[in-house]
Amino acid sequence: MIVGTAGHIDHGKTSLVRALTGVDTDRLKEEKARGITIELGFAYLPAPGGETIGFVDVPGHERFVRTMVAGSSGIDFALLAVAADDGCKPQTFEHLAILDMLGVRRGLVALTKADAVPPGRVAEVMGDMAGILADGPLADAPVLPVSAVTGEGLEPLREWLFRAAGDPIQRPVESRFRLAVDRVFTLAGAGVIVTGTALSGEVRVGDRVLLSPQGLPARVRALHVQNRPAPIGRAGQRCALNLSGEGVTTDAIHRGDMALDPELHAPADRIDASLRLLPGEGAALRPWFPVRLHHAAAEVAARIVRLDDEPLSAGGSAMVQLVLERPIAVASSDRFVIRDVSGQRTLGGGRFLDLRAPARKRRTPERIGQLQALTLSSPAEVLGALLDAAPHHCDWRAFRRDHALSEAQAHALAQELALVVLEAGDDAVALLPARWAALTADIMAALAALHAEHPDVQGLGRERLRLMLQPRLPAPAFAAALQSLARGQGIALDGAFVRLATHTVRLTEADEALWDEIAPRLGAAERFRPPRVRDLAEALGRPEGDIRRLCKLCARLGRVDEVAHDHFFLRGTVQEMADIVARLSAQSADGVFTAAAFRDQVDNGRKVAIQILDFFDRHGVTLRRGDQRRVNKHRLDLFGTAV
């Protein structure tokens, strides 16, 4: 269990930790000289059950509230110190508010310096505390009078801490590893050390991690957990990682960085979030209001963009977009605190919802519906609600990454919701089964309607079909959907076109009548030199476009082949010409023949003969070398010929 101290300056937090653990957490000369805590301090207390209780001692001075926030992120239990002589002071209330924003709900109040006041004063302050705590995060917390000088009340305090340490705590141990770095230093003979609270997952000696947001790779050479050497560190523990790697220096790593599983590296600088203001701070929130955002040990300048037009009253909540000055490493559902730019006041806090927030269309009803889904608690609830809301699909890989899900967790989640995952390269989109069924039905209905109205049309263009459907899938996911349907034999993919598997192109009655006029002119004695499109149009008194369209349609039906531009030959004629080149090749000792020999066989001009042979070259029926060609026997049956 990790315990974080809280409370006003000079209310005895450090003395209390020293009395409990024997460790003076004020390690800086300035701290000892001034008698105040400036930096985070750390101490440990063995518990009877084999647990080790870690203490994070934070500053109480108003100038160092940002350090207090850094130390309080990731704690399990709050130890709020209130001096019996002073009672509650400004930072007492501010620290309580910060604990509330960070979601800390377990803790107790140590009424320090109880030896310095009469018993009546102790009772008075204890009565005051009951009212102060009633509506806050520590509403049910006990208030224990203690004295670090005389030892009064220390034993009951230890017993409370030991009982709390024995209570089961749900931690995201199965998730991917994240550690919020709050200290960076070098140790002689070891190298660079980073310390912090493991927010999720596990880390072992030898693991590869990434320092984010800078993307610096490192290897864990050694590991201390709760101040002891250990082979593995887990979520909810204080860990010290001895890191090695190219570029791993104290200048390259900073407080506020995350040491994490490399799969999680995706820093965010525009985040949609739920925000709650503290009482009395509603009037401060103007459009693009500047704040200091605190997340774990990181602090960054940010601006707040409202996502609705409703006034945000003191103590009220709203959906907002946070536009950060620089990217930081975060995860969905992480908590944050906002303070004014001068660092004088804590304004509020909340939870991150979407780490990839859009800059445009961020206030649409569809978008707000998505954010409402993201406010739910567990990844399963979030994903289920998100896929129920328009556009009914999500980036599956981004969801897994932003929620720090391990492979096992992602697999279990996919099974729980029976997800349909459409994968295409690095892209993966998840849908619920009902949405997949609806999408399939919409695709089939669109194709059936097209075929009924236009039986002579091969199919719909893939992109046109995608744009027809609502909601619209990303292009890679839609391609994967079509491939899946094609494997199931519901549809067929013909190049850029999509059709029902049962559909075959049919000519309309008018087209069949026109074809009956065209076909005789392409056959008989003139079959090796048929008229071109313009000649057919002139002879039949029809527009060239009509003739060209019908000939191309007949080419798809296998009735003709377009040997050269606007020059169509009957398929039977093409078969006959393929037989001729096969015969010429067979008659030659070395299997080669010339264009002139072929020209003589088809009784045609050189230009048309060359065009025919070029057509065969393109289809691999003939293989050209210089002025000579030979036949590719493996392609002779391409047009129905087998010689």
Image (cartoon, rainbow, N blue to C red):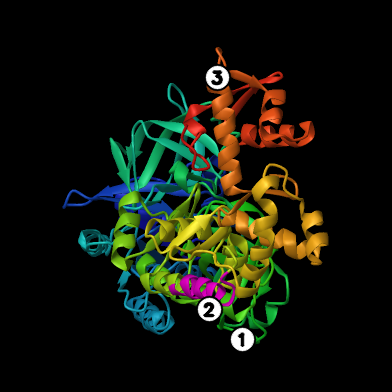
Q: Secondary structure at mark 1?
A: loop
Measure the C-alpha gap from mark 2 to mark 3: 76 Å
Q: Nearer the viewer, residue 610 or 266?
A: 610
Q: Which residue is mark 3?
A: 587
Q: Which residue is mark 2?
A: 369
The boundaries of the magenta stretch are 441-455
Q: For the residue marked with disc 3, what is the amino acid?
A: Gln
Measure the C-alpha gap from mark 2 to mark 1: 22 Å
Q: Earlier in the sequence, mark 1 or mark 3?
A: 1
Q: Residues within 10 Å of mark 1 (few under 14, many from 20)?
A: some
Q: Secondary structure at mark 3?
A: helix
On screen, residue 610 versus residue 66, left or right, reads: right
Q: In the picture, residue 190 is in which quadrant?
A: top left
Q: Earlier in the sequence, mark 2 or mark 1?
A: 1
Q: Is residue 309 above or below residue 509?
A: below
Q: Tell me if I can see residue 540 in this picture.
A: yes
Q: Earlier in the sequence, mark 2 or mark 3?
A: 2
Q: Is residue 630 above or below residue 266?
A: above
Q: Which residue is mark 1?
A: 313
Quarter that holds the N terminus: bottom left
Eye-nearest disc, 2 or 3: 3
Q: Residues within 10 Å of mark 2 (few under 14, many from 20)?
A: some
Q: Tell me if I can see residue 68 in this picture.
A: no
Eye-nearest disc, 2 or 1: 2
Q: Nearer the viewer, residue 514 or 273?
A: 514
Q: Secondary structure at mark 2?
A: helix
Residue 101 drawn at (x, y percent): 48, 70
Q: For the residue marked with disc 2, what is the amino acid?
A: Gly
Q: Residues within 10 Å of mark 3 (few under 14, many from 20)?
A: few
What residue appears at the point 68 percent right and 36 percent down from the top-left corner? 612
Q: Is residue 427 above or below residue 278?
A: above
